Image (tube, rainbow, N blue to C red):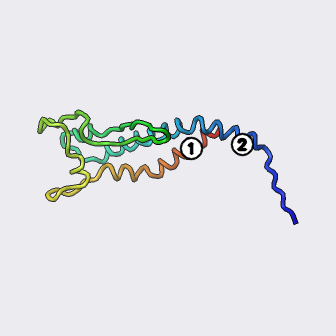
Amino acid sequence: MEAKIEIIGMNRLFARLGRAEDSLESKTVEGLSEVADRIVQDAKGIVSVDTGSLQKSIRKEDTVSQGYIHGVSVVAGGGGIINPKTGREVNYAAYVEYGTSKMQSKPFLRPALEQNRENLRHVLKSKLRESMQ
């Protein structure tokens, strides 16, 4: 008994994969950036606001790409944002996010990330499809 499998159109498949390789990297970075922008907006909507300094400090930062490793971070605090009450740079984002022994946590980054978990999957899947065309 013999089973024969024939694949028709391999040249088209290889051509598509070649095009995908050329654009997949840029499409993935593009998708990560889009989702990070959304996380920034959501975190700014969730964070507790007193002076607005912590809210202003929430931003996206692209990390340097190394080979096939790319990163986009959403950070809070620092960034040259000064709290008008203290006259100092915002340095308390982690205390708000995680709390202290004297203050209950008021998470804003983790919930924003969680809200966008499915969006991240959807965007990356969409970018993969785009790169295959």
Residue with the most extreme right position: 1
Instruction: Give the labeled residue for mark 2.
Output: 13
Foreground residue among 118 and 64: 64
Residue type for callout 1: Ser
Residue type for callout 2: Leu
> Could you say whether the residue bearing mark 1 is in a helix, strand or loop?
helix
Q: Quadrant of residue 102?
A: bottom left
For residue 22, above or below residue 9: above
Residue pictured at 49% horizontal, 37% vertical: 30
Please identify the quadrant where the N terminus is shown: bottom right
Number of marks: 2
Foreground residue among 3 and 50: 3
Residue pictured at 26% horizontal, 52% vertical: 97
In the image, residue 12 lies at what x, y percent?
74, 39
Instruction: Give the labeled residue for mark 1.
Output: 126
In the image, residue 86 lies at what x, y percent?
11, 38
Among the two numbered marks 1 and 2 on one chain, the one whose residue lies closer to the N terminus: 2
Residue with the most extreme front position: 67
